[in-house]
Image: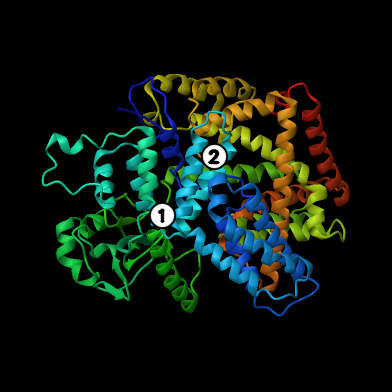
Amino acid sequence: MTMEDGWPMASATSMPDTADEARNALKGPKRAWSSPSTLTVPSAAMELKEWLGDSRSFDPGNHPAALQSAIDDFNRSTESALPMNVRDAIQAELTALKAALVPLRNDATASRAPAEAALGVLLERLKSPDVLRAAWLDLWAKCGRVESSPDAIALRRDLFLACARLAEHDLEEFLYDLDGLLDNDASTVLRIRVALGDTGMPDSLDAPEVWETTELSATGRRDLVSRYLALPVAPHDHVVWLAYERAALHLRNAVTIENMAFFESQIVPPEPQAIDSKLAQYGEQWTDHDGHMAAEMARGQGIVLVRVFLPANTYVDPVQTARDQVEALVTLGKFHADASWDRVWHLLPGAQHKSPTQLRLQLITPSSDPAGAGRDRQARVFREMATWATAHSKIPITEGRLAEAIELLGWWRDAQDQSALGRVTANVRVIEVAGSRVGTTPWGDHLSRYMKSAWLVYQCRRELAATIYDAVGAELSQLPPAMWQPLQTIKDKTVHYDGLDRVDLVPNSTRTAVEELQALYPRHHQVGRRLRTLHNRLDKPAAFDQWLTELKNQWLSLVDRLVRIRNAITHGGPATPGAVDSIALFSSYLAAWEVEIVLEAALTGDDLVAAHNTFQTQKSDFLEACKTAQRPGDHLYI
């Protein structure tokens, strides 16, 4: 067997089918495929729940608009991101909720109790196996049609994963089982059939007849997955190992705090058996795998290892749950010690995880770059400093407008290292300061006046670049051997890597790249669908116009949500993680363009209103040129 994107291939020339495409769609669940402009129904429902339950004293001047915005977000998700089978499964609950929301549209002071009750019923329904199974069948149906758009598959994929999270499935375990079923893995098929009661566990796995019924057709795999989704979510315990650098205990032995055991890495022996012998007394319900897990952890001066035991329960993401518990304790410690946040107790990426059916090991090392790479990056920063000083030597860096522009740049730069909530807060600060220098227009209107065209252009160019990068960046070992050399050839002609961390597209290469990649990728492949869709949009004015219409609708949703969340942050209102995450990157783009305009105006001495108008005109003129061209790609291809 060979592999394509993790897909089983019968030979180097066979093409993936519906089961293969569905299997691939469920990889990388933390990365959403669909546009952040439309929340999944579970996410929109949770955001609406927070607004209906808002406990603040009612402000008739501001709160009605915010509540209406949350209702609109929910309605958009049910109108554009709710496929047929899921809609049928929740139709009764959805109809009841929309009826309960009608009085609040007309009078925001009306009782929210009926809507809250109806929303509670809908959320319970969304957790049910019936809805999860309906979401699965919707995803399968779209993957089965060659003409399905990548956007349609993305929406259904993200909805299925959102329903699985809401049902409190351990996504790692859950997707491990689905991957095995869709891959026709004999041991997984047998284990699931035993769980479903189709067969008993054989006395011996060596007999050939045991495996005769485990080879399934594509539709057989679809049906077995559908039945698997009806199994109840079972509680399990978990063990997770984490590592911190720039940390210390200054203790000779380990210390246990509740369900967490802390170890100076220097006291941890290198061999698993020695680790078990020395440290088992400190870890709650120490397992036979703990020694192997600890042996893979980072070691050295200033590194502390943490073992977290999670008791039997349902966890959507056990590793993240463990991280959150430890980070909460570390945050309290830093606060009371008055410690510098970015200098001590820094959590390293990665974790060792023992679940009921799997042991997941990964090598965890300190985050510091090798000295050579670090010097190269530092030198690049210095070169940029010298270039700036040479080009703008006549303008003191302390000049008023320039100093403010650099301050805003610092806010934007610092925002990139924050959580989603921190990023939005800092980016909004940049947007509002810049907007206030232009006029008194509400900043939501300011964004639509000056930034909308820039965002539309950027989305078009971003989709072009991202599609090419995703196509040429696939692991060759996971693609049919027949694709390896052609893909490498296209990559060499199209992508330039500077040896550090900067990747660029080679000028005048992208049109040919899209055409060649489109011909190379198979039909049942999300990247192949994206390439075909992109080529059509850049080749045909009607398709490009339709794309722009979709992007304009996305813009309206994102700006509306950004304004609502900005007001919620400022005034202590609801802001669910899903909604905040959905506009974090959007806010970064807007803030970056504001910094660009303010900085350029400070350097040239231009009026800031004129600078904003020039920026907007350049982008809108470019869009108009694309719309009137015989082929929009003549302007968009790089």
- Return the x and y of residue 389 as percentages of the image width and height: 70, 45
Q: Is residue 259 above or below residue 168?
A: below
For label 2, the residue is 153
In terms of sequence position, does the residue under pointer 2 or pointer 1 come before the other? 2
Horizontal and vertical percent for residue 126?
A: 51, 58
Judge whether 314 appears above or below 472 on screen. below
User: Which residue is farthest front?
Assistant: 92
Q: Nearer the viewer, mark 2 or mark 1?
A: 2
Nearer to me, 489 or 187: 187
Q: CA distance from mark 2 to mark 1?
A: 31 Å
Could you tell whether 521 is left or right of 269 in the image? right
Q: Secondary structure at mark 1?
A: loop
Which residue carries the number 1 mark? 349
Q: Position of residue 460 (x, y in %)?
A: 68, 36
Instruction: Tell me the amino acid under the disc marked 2.
Output: Ile
Q: State whether residue 427 appears in this view.
A: yes
